[in-house]
Image: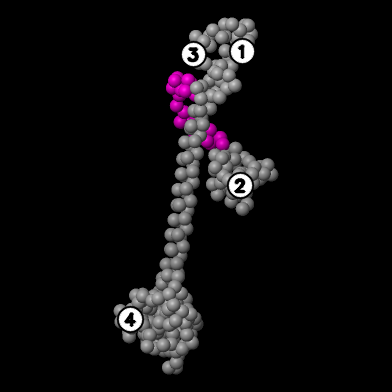
């Protein structure tokens, strides 16, 4: 994956959020040192997350200080009772008393700020992950629609080509309600099959298309079981009719006319 693909993949957002596996995180750590463009993109993402948190900032409640302070793990007990703290501070020399008071205030301020921004960062990270998931789903849907559109356009182009003769195949024998259509180019021999209603078959059976040439059947190939309904078959010249038979899996060199499903004259 080149640097541009990496930037567009959405992995950098997960990297900044710390959600990538260790090996992928290490790889990006190394790449950003060697590629200025990649490092600048990562810095932009970090700035965007910080800006998002600032925009949605809400002043924390005063009681949050005590809640956080109660969870801090210091080597000595941090007592937030105002009278006891004041008593301890008064007993200290002036310069130490000032430093201690400033330290307590700084610790509480830092703890509240850290807790607040960590919460906002988590919310922003969750939203980014959800957005990335939606982006991936949308990309897959667009890809599917594009593929289907190209397939349909291709089929319509063949079906509407005046150089191709449309031969309707109607059900007989074992499949009276079956039907299919062959689009055949008499000059080039190009043959396309449009599958319609066909009978159910077992896993060891397969349909096979034939062309009648001078009264003899010519194999045009078996019909794959991949669900395709519009298939390009083998080329054939001088066809007089087309037919589909039900054969063992893989087809046969000669059709079993007792298993004839559909047939149509050119």
Between residue 54 and residue 129, name the one nearer to us. Answer: 129
The reply to whether callout 2 and callout 3 are in contact (CB within 8 Å) is no
Q: What element does badge 3 sit on?
A: loop
Work out which quarter of the rendered image holds the C terminus and state it: bottom left
Task: Spot the residue most to the front.
Answer: 76
Is residue 266 at all visible to an observer of this figure? no
Q: How many marks?
A: 4
Which of the two discs, 4 and 2, labels the residue nearer the N terminus? 2
Q: Earlier in the sequence, mark 3 or mark 4?
A: 3
- Magenta-colored span: 46-68
Per the image, the residue denoted by label 1 is 99
Give the x, y percent position of residue 164: 43, 79
What residue is shown with label 3? 81
* Relative horizontal placement of residue 115, taking residue 160 as reference (left or right): right
The color scheme shown is one colour
Kindly identify the residue that appears in the image at 48 percent across and 20 percent down.
Answer: 66
Residue denoted by label 4: 175
Name the residue: 43% across, 93% down. Answer: 215
Q: Which residue is drawn at the image coordinates 66% and 45% (left, top)?
A: 31
Q: Earlier in the sequence, mark 2 or mark 1?
A: 2
Residue 24: numbered disc: 2
Q: Position of residue 211 (x, y in %)?
A: 44, 86
Residue 145 position (above or below residue 220):
above
Q: CA distance from mark 2 to mark 1?
A: 44 Å
């Amino acid at each position: 994956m080149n640097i541009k693909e990496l930037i567009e993949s959405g992995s950098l957002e997960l990297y900044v959020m710390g959600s990538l596996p260790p090996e992928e995180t290490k790889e990006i750590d190394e790449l950003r040192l060697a590629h200025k463009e990649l490092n600048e993109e990562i810095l932009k993402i970090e700035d965007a997350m910080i800006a998002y948190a600032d925009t949605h900032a809400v002043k924390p409640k005063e009681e949050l200080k005590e809640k956080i302070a109660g969870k801090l793990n210091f080597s000595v007990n941090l007592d937030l009772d105002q009278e006891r703290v004041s008593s301890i501070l008064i007993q200290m020399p002036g310069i130490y008393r000032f430093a201690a008071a400033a330290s307590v205030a700084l610790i509480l301020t830092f703890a509240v700020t850290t807790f607040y921004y960590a919460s906002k960062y988590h919310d922003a990270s969750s939203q980014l992950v959800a957005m990335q998931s939606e982006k991936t789903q949308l990309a897959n849907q667009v890809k599917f629609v594009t593929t289907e559109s190209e397939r349909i356009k291709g089929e319509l182009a063949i079906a509407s080509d005046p150089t191709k003769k449309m031969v309707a195949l109607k059900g007989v024998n074992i499949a009276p309600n079956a039907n299919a259509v062959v689009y055949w180019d008499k000059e080039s021999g190009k043959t396309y099959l449009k599958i319609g209603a066909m009978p159910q078959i077992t896993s060891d059976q397969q349909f096979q298309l034939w062309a009648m040439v001078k009264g003899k059947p010519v194999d045009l190939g078996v019909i794959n079981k991949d669900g395709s309904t519009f298939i390009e078959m083998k080329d054939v010249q001088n066809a007089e009719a087309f037919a589909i038979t039900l054969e063992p899996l893989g087809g046969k060199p000669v059709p079993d006319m007792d298993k004839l499903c559909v047939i149509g004259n050119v």
